[in-house]
Amino acid sequence: MNRRVKKAVGKMAKEAIEHTPKPIKEKVKDFVVDKAKEKVVEHIQDKANGFTEKLEHGQEKMAEKVQDKSVEAKENTQDVLLTARQKLGKVVEAGRELQEKVSSSHKHDDKRKIKGAHNIKHVSNIKTSKDIKGATKIKSYEKIKS
């Protein structure tokens, strides 16, 4: 509204209030108080609804962020566990190879073997004069390949 109109309406309201009887003034006062209370309650409810909407929107955003971060953390954890699993697999394989090398070196190592009674030569294994080559068994120059 225009300033002049507001001023005129205000003056008219004051004049009307001054010339009205007391019982009507009381009723108008009660009516105005009730209307003012309603307006205040409506205003507070509007503010509360706006605040609730903002809070819900903020909660949704926060839930989305938490969900995204949890998915990212899960992926990172799985990557780390997979890497650790691969490294442990390599360590296990290297351990097996080392164990095979160590055990195979003991199998072929004659120095570490303990000789038993079966390794001792018997009398029958000792060469006698019969086992020694004679002059007839020696190769001649004719039998040697050139």
Image (cartoon, rainbow, N blue to C red):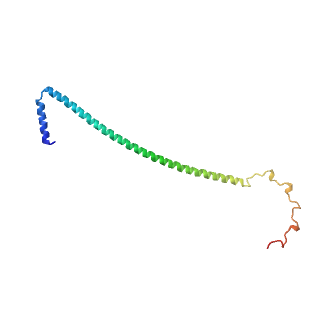
Quadrant that contains the C terminus? bottom right
Vertical relation: 39 (above or below) 73: above
Quadrant that contains the N terminus? top left
- Residue at image point 28% right, 37% down: 46
Residue 62 lies, in percent from the top left, at: 39, 43
- Residue at image point 18% right, 29% down: 29
In this rendering, position of residue 116 left or right of residue 26: right
Vertical relation: 75 (above or below) 26: below
- Residue at image point 19% right, 28% down: 30
Q: Nearer the viewer, residue 71 or 89?
A: 71
In this rendering, position of residue 42 left or right of residue 57: left
Residue 86 lies, in percent from the top left, at: 55, 51
- Residue at image point 33% right, 41% down: 54
Count of picture labels? 0
Task: Identify the image quadrant of residue 11.
Answer: top left
In this rendering, position of residue 10 left or right of residue 37: left
In this rendering, position of residue 22 left or right of residue 51: left
Residue 22 lies, in percent from the top left, at: 13, 26
Task: Identify the image quadrant of residue 15.
Answer: top left
Residue 23 lies, in percent from the top left, at: 15, 26
Vertical relation: 2 (above or below) 17: below
